[in-house]
Image (cartoon, rainbow, N blue to C red):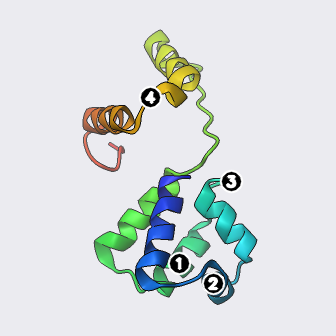
Amino acid sequence: MTPFGERLRALRAERGVSQKAMAQAIGVSAAYLSALEHGRRGAPTWTLIQKIIGYFNIIWDDAEDLARLAETSHPRVRIDTSGLSPAATELANLLAESIEKLDEAELRKITASVRSALGGAGGKR
């Protein structure tokens, strides 16, 4: 499951909405919505994110947080380190080779550390 899928599922549960009902309301199939929640589909389009935000009537910071989660929720990440330092290549490969060995607490700690190094929660300078 991706961070976006986890949040989407939580929003549906909080409001007592079925996948089928939500899917019909936003114009996608229930199978697609299920795949999105379970991380079997890539990040949703900006248009679909906006439909979801409108469907749940999410505003301001919560809407921005949901959009940020969608941007960082692609289940098959590719990192091109060509032209970067050897340290960058080493880090990318280390994560690729061993991320499944880390528990949730370790993952959250590493994520917080990377965000801090990048200067904020969004990770963009």
Q: Are marks 2 and 1 in contact (CB under 8 Å)?
A: yes
Badge 3 crowding class, 10 Å Cα cut-off, few under 14, some 14 to 19, many 20 or more, is some
Instruction: Estimate the x, y position of residue 12 in percent, counting from the top left.
Output: 49, 77
What label sits on residue 102 in the rendered view?
A: 4
Going by the numbered disc 3, the residue's amino acid type is Arg
Q: Residue at x 48, y 60 (%)?
A: 6
How far is disc 2 from disc 1 in space, using C-alphas? 7 Å
Q: Which residue is mark 1?
A: 52
Secondary-structure class at tag 2: helix
Quadrant where the C terminus is found in the figure = top left
Residue sticking out furthest to the top: 86
Q: Which residue is mark 2?
A: 26
Q: Are marks 1 and 3 in contact (CB under 8 Å)?
A: no
How far is disc 1 from disc 3 in space, using C-alphas? 18 Å
Instruction: Estimate the x, y position of residue 123 in percent, counting from the top left.
Output: 35, 44
Going by the numbered disc 4, the residue's amino acid type is Leu
Secondary-structure class at tag 3: loop
Badge 2 crowding class, 10 Å Cα cut-off, few under 14, some 14 to 19, many 20 or more, is some
How far is disc 2 from disc 3 in space, using C-alphas? 19 Å
How far is disc 4 from disc 2 in space, using C-alphas? 36 Å
How far is disc 4 from disc 1 in space, using C-alphas? 31 Å
Going by the numbered disc 2, the residue's amino acid type is Ile
N-term mark: 1 or 3: 3
Q: Which residue is mark 3?
A: 40
Instruction: Estimate the x, y position of residue 61 in percent, counting from the top left.
Output: 29, 70
Quarter of the figure with residue 29: bottom right
How far is disc 3 from disc 4 in space, using C-alphas? 21 Å
Secondary-structure class at tag 1: helix
